Image: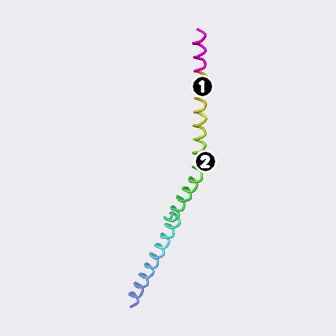
Amino acid sequence: MGKSKNKMESKKRYRNKTVETKKKKSRRAIIEGFTLIELLAVIVIIGVLIGIAFPAISGRIRETRDNTYKLHETDMKVAASNLMSECVSK
């Protein structure tokens, strides 16, 4: 009877150790990884920041494009003026 009692106690100890190691592993897994909620929150924050910054950036791009068109228009006027002056002088 003493041996069977020792076997039962050793089985209980083994079970308790495996439960403890499983708990430790699951805690490590929780600590090491990101949850879906955290990832979604980061994606939402990045989206909001892009939404705030995009109008300012697109406005600057539009201004730059308009300035380029104005410079090209001025260059064309100067070129036309030079051509007219060369034609008149000949």
The reply to whether dot 1 and dot 2 touch (C-beta < 8 Å) is no
Disc on the earlier residue, 1 or 2: 2
In the displayed image of the protein, which residue is found farthest to the front? 88
Q: Is residue 89 magenta?
A: yes
Q: How many marks?
A: 2
Q: Nearer the viewer, residue 32 or 37?
A: 37
Q: Position of residue 42 (x, y in %)?
A: 54, 59
The amino acid sitting under disc 1 is Asp
Q: Quadrant of the N terminus?
A: bottom left
Q: Which residue is mark 1?
A: 75
Q: Nearer the viewer, residue 68 or 85?
A: 85
Q: Which residues are magenta?
A: 80-90
Q: Is residue 17 magenta?
A: no
Does dot 1 land on a helix, a strand or a loop? helix
Q: Which residue is mark 2?
A: 56
Does dot 2 land on a helix, a strand or a loop? helix
Q: Residue at x 39, y 87 (%)?
A: 3
58 with respect to 11 (left or right): right
